Amino acid sequence: MDDAKNFVLGIFQTVKDRFGNPLVSAFVVSWAIWNFRLLLVLLGSGDGGWQTKITYIDKQLMPEWVDWGIHGFLIPIAFALLWIYILPPALRTVAAYHESSQNKTREAIFTATEARTLSAEEALNLRQVMVKQRAEWQSEKAEIVQSLENFVKKLESANEGLQAANAREQGLAKEVASLKKEIEKLKEPPPRTPYNFAGKPTKEKAAALGLQLLNRNPISPSSISFDGFPVNWPWMPTEHSRFNIPHKRLIEHPLDEEAIWGMFYLLRKYRGGGSPPQAANEWAEVFRDAGAKRPDALVRHLLLHGVLSGNYEAPEFSAQQTSSIRWLQQVGFKETETPKQQ
């Protein structure tokens, strides 16, 4: 069913395409005009039916096959070719000639009008119009010149104002910079001298360091004391007490009891020389044997406080790194005897 439908649609499309061609269309129109009598016989009612019509056509209109060739094809195709190839150029030529003639006519009329001599009244009116237009032009010119002069004055005034604003801005910038310097000076702490720990009472020294002391011994035995007093760990100096601590690496991170114990242990163990370990795991093993609870964390803390140098994989210890440990001993920190941690 679909194949039959597609076949019929294809035929209709072909017929449509053919009749859409200019030559076919012209041929059909020419054939219909030239053979109008044949069309009247075919389409008219008449008497005798189709047989009578066919007989009439064969005997009266188209008695010979030559008539079909001449009247049915040659004459209509000749008119179609004439319609397509001869008539359009001819019409184009006629249209171009007609338009050219119209242009020549208009040019002749314009030339004759321009060459016409003006009368005295027309000349007077024309002169008055020219004088009026010149006066208007002079007035407009003066207004334009005045506008330009005003615009230049405004530009000069704006430029002067901009220069004055720039000068004020520069002055303000200098004033702001001066005020900032004054503020920075005001923010600076007043000049003071570091606290002298020599011979001072324990509580006074602890206050200078921002250190909190315990009135009684803690439940677990401590490994580090301050002038014999137990300390509340971790120790983080206050901003005020930082001024009295010369070794800044000690105050960059909180100090706990185990870290200070590790410092004292290094000073005691390697005071006379010896060969310290070369790797982090070896250091951790040394501290573990000495009783440290967290030997790996202790190695990291000593690196942060500058007692061990280098990196975590291969920390180093030398005599130049004992100044902060000695200072802790001088101000009052001491290592106590504690049982080895298992």
Image (tube, grey):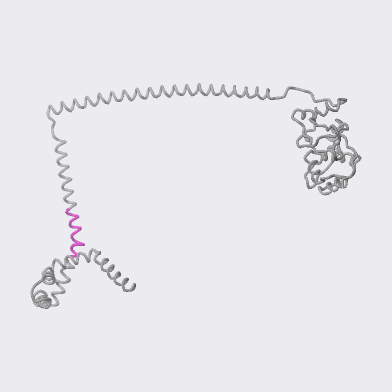
State which region is magenta: 79-94
Q: Position of residue 119 (x, y in %)?
A: 12, 29
> Does residue 62 lie above or below 262 as drawn?
below
Residue placed at 83% from the left, 27% from the top? Answer: 205
Q: Is residue 135 magenta?
A: no
Tell me the quarter of the image containing the N terminus.
bottom left
Tell me if 89 is positioned left or right of 228 in this view.
Answer: left
Residue placed at 82% from the left, 29% from the top? Answer: 206
Tell me if 183 is positioned left or right of 64 in this view.
Answer: right
Between 116 and 92, which is closer to the camera in this rendering?
A: 92
Between 276 and 231, which is closer to the camera in this rendering?
A: 231
To which quarter of the image does residue 244 belong? Answer: top right
Q: Position of residue 187 (x, y in %)?
A: 68, 25
To which quarter of the image does residue 197 belong? Answer: top right
Q: Position of residue 338 (x, y in %)?
A: 89, 41
Q: Is residue 86 magenta?
A: yes
**What secondary structure characterizes most of the magenta part?**
helix
Between 207 and 165, which is closer to the camera in this rendering?
A: 207
> Does residue 97 lie above or below 115 as drawn?
below
Q: Is residue 326 visible?
A: no
